[in-house]
C-alpha cells in the first residue's frame, strides 16, 4: 500500500548504505521480470544492466506491444500520457503498485518542501478532458485545477481572486506561468499579507533565479519556492531546495545515469550529459535505461546519493558555442535577466556560429555591449542578431522555450 511505499522511499533516501543495497535488489528484480515476461527484453536474459539498450519514446511507440509484460496484458492498468508538446506523444501503462509508488512520492516530496497532504493547493495547468477532475474529487483532495490555456488579464484576475478567497496554501505550475502571475499581482498592488501561500512548486521546467526572487517578494519570506523535476510517464524524479542548490533525486524509485551527448558512455564529472532513467517499479511497461531527452550535470559524492547539479532541459534546446561545446542555459539566464526592461526573451541557435536573440521589451542599456560580453561565452566569431517582438509564444502545454537549437547536427 501507499504507506509502505512511502516508508520504503524515505528509508532509501535517508540511509545511503541501506539504500544502495535495496536499489541493487530492485534492479535485479526488474531485469529478471522484464526479460522473462516481455517480448523485447527476452533476448537480454542473463545480461548485466550495462548491456541493456538505451531507449526513447520513438522506440517504445514503434514496438509498443513488445514492451508490455504478458503478466499484465489482461489486467486493469493505469495510463499516463505525455502531450508531446515538446517532443513525441507517449502513453505508459502502470501496474497498481507502481501507481501507489507515485502517490507515495507525491506525499514524501511534498513534505520535503513543507506541503502536507490535503492542504489547499491550486494546480495551474492546461486542462483537457483526461486531466480534468470532478468537483467532488477536487473537494476530497483539496487540489483545485485551473485551466491556463489562455493567460489573459481576466484569467489571471480570476486565478488571483481564487488564491486569496480560498486561502490557498500551495501552488504548482510551470515557471513561465508564475512569471505571468507575479506580474499581474504586482500591477494590482497586492501585498504578501493578502495571501496564505507558503509553498510554490515549479514543475515541468526549472524556475529561473529572477522568477524565484519575484515569488519570494510577492508571497513573502514565509513562502518556500522549489523546482520539481518530474515527468508524466514516471513520476517525481527530484526536487531542489528553497535556495536551488541542485536537485536531490528520487533514488528510492528510479536509477539515474548521465551519458555523453554523442554516445552511450558515462559523462565525465562536471560534463553536460543526457539524463537516462530506469523506473524500478513499473512492471506492466518496463522503462529500462530510458533517455528522457533532458540534459544536465550529475554530481557524485562518496557515501551520498548523486544529485543533478543543473538540469538544462531537452537536448534539442541545448545551446552550443562556436566550437560545438554545450553552454549552460543558466549562463544565458544570468545575462538575460541582468537586462532591465526585458519582459521576455528567447535565444535561438540557427547555425554553428549564428544566433538570434528575441526580446519582448526595451532594455535600458546598450544591448550591443551586453552581447559582446555574451560572445566571450559563445566565441568571438559568434554572430548574434537581435529581434524585437511583442510576445514570445508558449507551447500548447503553456511552457516557454527560453533556448532553442535549430542545428540539424552538432
Image: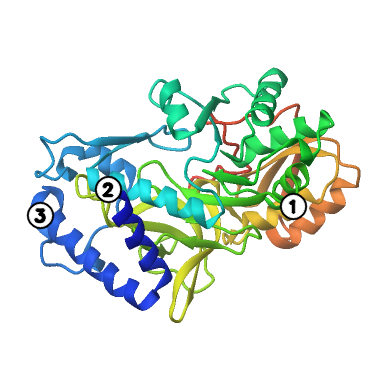
Alpha carbon separation for disc pair 3 and 2: 22 Å
The image's mark for residue 221 is 1
Q: Earlier in the sequence, mark 3 or mark 1?
A: 3
Expressed as whole percent of the image width and height from the top left, the position of residue 52 reads: 23, 61
**Which quarter of the picture shows residue 158?**
top right
**137 vs 264, nearest the viewer:** 137
**Which quarter of the picture shows residue 133?**
top left
Q: Secondary structure at mark 3?
A: helix
Q: Callout 2: 10 Å neighbours few (<14), some, many (20+)? A: many
Q: Nearer the viewer, mark 3 or mark 1?
A: 1
Expressed as whole percent of the image width and height from the top left, the position of residue 401 reads: 59, 40
Expressed as whole percent of the image width and height from the top left, the position of residue 83 reads: 42, 32
**115 vs 348, nearest the viewer:** 115
Quick check: 267 left or right of 289? right
**Extreme-bottom residue of the structure:** 302
Quick check: 80 left or right of 141? left
Q: Secondary structure at mark 1?
A: loop
**114 vs 211, nearest the viewer:** 114
Q: Secondary structure at mark 2?
A: helix
Which residue is found at the position 67% from the left and 27% from the top?
Answer: 165
Quick check: 193 left or right of 392? right
Q: Is any atom of residue 3 visible in this view?
A: yes
Residue at mark 2: 98
Alpha carbon separation for disc pair 1 and 2: 36 Å
Residue at mark 3: 42
- Residue 309 vs 236, above or below: the answer is below
Q: Earlier in the sequence, mark 3 or mark 2?
A: 3
Amino acid at each position: 500500500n501507499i504507506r509502505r511505499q512511502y516508508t520504503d522511499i524515505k528509508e532509501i533516501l535517508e540511509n545511503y548504505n541501506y539504500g544502495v543495497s535495496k536499489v541493487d535488489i530492485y534492479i535485479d528484480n526488474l531485469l529478471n521480470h522484464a526479460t522473462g515476461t516481455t517480448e523485447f527484453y527476452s533476448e537480454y536474459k542473463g545480461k548485466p544492466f550495462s548491456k541493456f539498450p538505451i531507449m526513447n519514446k520513438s522506440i517504445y511507440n514503434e514496438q509498443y506491444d513488445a514492451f508490455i509484460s504478458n503478466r499484465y496484458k489482461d489486467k486493469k492498468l493505469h495510463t499516463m500520457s505525455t502531450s508531446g508538446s515538446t517532443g513525441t506523444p507517449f502513453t505508459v501503462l502502470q501496474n497498481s503498485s507502481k501507481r501507489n509508488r507515485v502517490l507515495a512520492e507525491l506525499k514524501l516530496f511534498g513534505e520535503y518542501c513543507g506541503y502536507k497532504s490535503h492542504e489547499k493547493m491550486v494546480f495551474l495547468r492546461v486542462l483537457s478532458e483526461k486531466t480534468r477532475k470532478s468537483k467532488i474529487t477536487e473537494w476530497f483532495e483539496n487540489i483545485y485545477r485551473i485551466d491556463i490555456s489562455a493567460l489573459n488579464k481576466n484569467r489571471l484576475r480570476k486565478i488571483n481572486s481564487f488564491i486569496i478567497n480560498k486561502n490557498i496554501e500551495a501552488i504548482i505550475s510551470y515557471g513561465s506561468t508564475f512569471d505571468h502571475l507575479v506580474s499581474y499581482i504586482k500591477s494590482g498592488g497586492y501585498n504578501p499579507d493578502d495571501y496564505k501561500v507558503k509553498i510554490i512548486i515549479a514543475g515541468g521546467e526549472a524556475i529561473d533565479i529572477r522568477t524565484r526572487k519575484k515569488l519570494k517578494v510577492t508571497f513573502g519570506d514565509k513562502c518556500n519556492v522549489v523546482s520539481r523535476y518530474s515527468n508524466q510517464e514516471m513520476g517525481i524524479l527530484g526536487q531542489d531546495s528553497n535556495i536551488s542548490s541542485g536537485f536531490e533525486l528520487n533514488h528510492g524509485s528510479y536509477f539515474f545515469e548521465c551519458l555523453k551527448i554523442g554516445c552511450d558512455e558515462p559523462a565525465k564529472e562536471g560534463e553536460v550529459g543526457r539524463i537516462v532513467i530506469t523506473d524500478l517499479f513499473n512492471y506492466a511497461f518496463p522503462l529500462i535505461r530510458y533517455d528522457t531527452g533532458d540534459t544536465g550535470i550529475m554530481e557524485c559524492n562518496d557515501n551520498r546519493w548523486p544529485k543533478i547539479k543543473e538540469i538544462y532541459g531537452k537536448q534539442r534546446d541545448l545551446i552550443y558555442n562556436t566550437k560545438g561545446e554545450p553552454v549552460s542555459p543558466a549562463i544565458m539566464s544570468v545575462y538575460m535577466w541582468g537586462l532591465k526592461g526585458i519582459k521576455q526573451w528567447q535565444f535561438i541557435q540557427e547555425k554553428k556560429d549564428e544566433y538570434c536573440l528575441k526580446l519582448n521589451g526595451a532594455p535600458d542599456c546598450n544591448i550591443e555591449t551586453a552581447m559582446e560580453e555574451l560572445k566571450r561565452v559563445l566565441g568571438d566569431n559568434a554572430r548574434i542578431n537581435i529581434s524585437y517582438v511583442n510576445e514570445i509564444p508558449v507551447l500548447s502545454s503553456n511552457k516557454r522555450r527560453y533556448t532553442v537549437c535549430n542545428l540539424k547536427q552538432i
